[in-house]
Amino acid sequence: MYSTRPGLILGFHGCDESLVTDVVRGKASLRNSTNKYDWLGHGVYMWDNSPSRALEFAKWLKLNPGKSKTPIKNPAVIGAVINLGFCLDLLDYQNLFFLKEAHTLLVATSNALGKDMPVNKTVGSSRDLILRELDCAVIETLHQFREDSSMQAFDSVRGVFSEGDDLYTNAGFKEKDHIQICIMNPNCIKGYFLPKTENKKFKKV
């Protein structure tokens, strides 16, 4: 009964400046990501309340053009006002049970079809499981099961991603830990905006 998230939150998406302009003017929309390694499944990805991380990612895409479907010339950030709606919030303990059950279903289906299970993978020398093919398949299996069972579809997915080197010696935190949001229902996005630069003459609010 608590899966519907009340209120509005802010999400931030890193992309090229030209796309920011077009989306704010209503000439374009942010595209769904449908990679088989998307760790929260398929949808529009946002950084939860972190424009700085969104900008860093856009700058990284500029330096690694093969990682983006469209080249990024001028890294920029667009903000979105979001209502998560009926959310598969993986910060909520009870929702992890749904993933475990979906994994069991995926294993059974793969075995019945004689297919290999997808695997989460690292990239290069990184120890992080960046390519989340297994996690993506599990979440998409959950969505498909709910659709086949005529159950209410999730509007969004929210989860914590631990990434990067230890923040300090023996830390339990990583230098790029963050919360991400994946939006499947476009009606969750109530509007877009251009993030402002903080006015240093006044206190933070």
Image: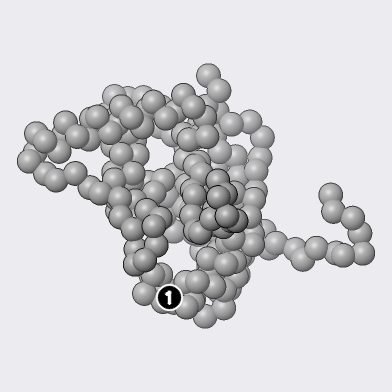
Q: Position of residue 144 (x, y in %)?
A: 29, 35
* Residue lying at 59% horizontally and 31% vertically, measured from the top left: 5
Q: Position of residue 166 (x, y in %)?
A: 53, 55
- Asked whether, in this view, residue 30 is left or right of residue 197, the answer is left
* Residue lying at 48% horizontally and 54% vertically, measured from the top left: 163
Circle 1 residues within 10 Å: few <14, some 14–19, many ≥20: few
- Asked whether, in this view, residue 135 is left or right of residue 81, the answer is left
Q: Position of residue 153 (x, y in %)?
A: 40, 32
* Residue lying at 42% horizontally and 50% vertically, measured from the top left: 43
Q: Position of residue 102 (x, y in %)?
A: 30, 31
Q: Secondary structure at mark 1?
A: loop
Q: Please, which residue is most extreme toward the top here? A: 1
Q: Is residue 111 above or below residue 161?
A: above
Q: Amino acid at mark 1?
A: Asn
Of 177 and 191, the residue lying toward us? 177
How many discs mark residues in the rendered view?
1
Q: Which picture quadrant has residue 151?
A: top left
* Residue lying at 66% horizontally and 35% vertically, measured from the top left: 7
Of 59 and 11, the residue lying toward us? 59
The colour scheme applied to this rendered structure is one colour
Q: Please, which residue is most extreme toward the front here? A: 169
Confirm whether residue 149 shows in the render: yes
Q: Is residue 48 above or below residue 1?
A: below
Q: Which picture quadrant has residue 9?
A: top right
Confirm whether residue 26 shows in the render: no
Check disc 1 and report the residue beneath it. 64
